[in-house]
Image (tube, grey):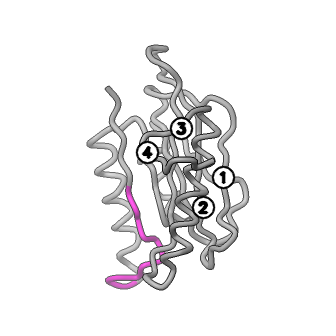
Amino acid sequence: QMELLSWNVECLDDRGGQGTFALRMLEVARVVAAERPAAVLLQEVNRPALDILAAQELLGSQYEVVVPEDPSFPYYVAMLLHKEQLRRVGKSVAVDYPGSLSGRQLLAQGVERADGRGAPLLLATAHLESDESMDQERRRQFMRSMRHLQRAVGRPLPGAAPGAQ
């Protein structure tokens, strides 16, 4: 059994004014620390948010941060991997979506359980276009993600469209 947490932390959302950003990130850190998931899959995260979450006093002593090598926008996807529960297998891979107007992408990372039990896993997180007018682009992004994941694991994924390659 492995617990995962996926969270769109909406770092560019300024609800409540500038002062609430740090409080929101502290609340994310509190929930993650209380739940202790093996991995946290983040969307709409930015460097200031990761600086808060990865602080040694918060999650940095327990979680390794995985981010795209060179994000093209100020917010992106990221992962937090629990150091006692998971080990990275290989390098992370970021798959850009060429039609994205907002630098959206998929981030995938191979992992294995730190105790050596079970087969390696491929974890992935993505942030697809969300605007209603971007429906067709969102579908292309989803299919691009599925093709990448299918190639990465070497066989069709459950739920993949027939012939998706």
Relative vertical location of residue 44 with respect to residue 122 in this rendering, above or below: below
Q: Residues within 10 Å of mark 3 (few under 14, many from 20)?
A: some
Marked residue nearer the N-terminal end (4 or 2):
4
**Mark linked to residue 70:** none
Q: Is residue 61 visible?
A: no
Residue drawn at x 49%, y 45% as measured from the top left: 80
| Labels 4 and 2 touching (C-beta < 8 A) | no
Mark nearest the camera among 4 and 2 is 2
**Cα distance between the residues tagged 1 and 3:** 20 Å
Residue drawn at x 33%, y 38% as measured from the top left: 36
Please state if 34 lies on the left or on the right of 41 as rendered. Answer: left
Mark 3 lies on residue = 156
**Cα distance between the residues tagged 4 and 1:** 23 Å
Mark 2 lies on residue = 105
Please state if 122 lies on the left or on the right of 131 as rendered. Answer: right
Counting every numbered tag in the picture gives 4
**Cα distance between the residues tagged 3 and 2:** 21 Å
**Cα distance between the residues tagged 4 and 3:** 35 Å
* Residue 123 screen position, x and y as percent: 51, 40
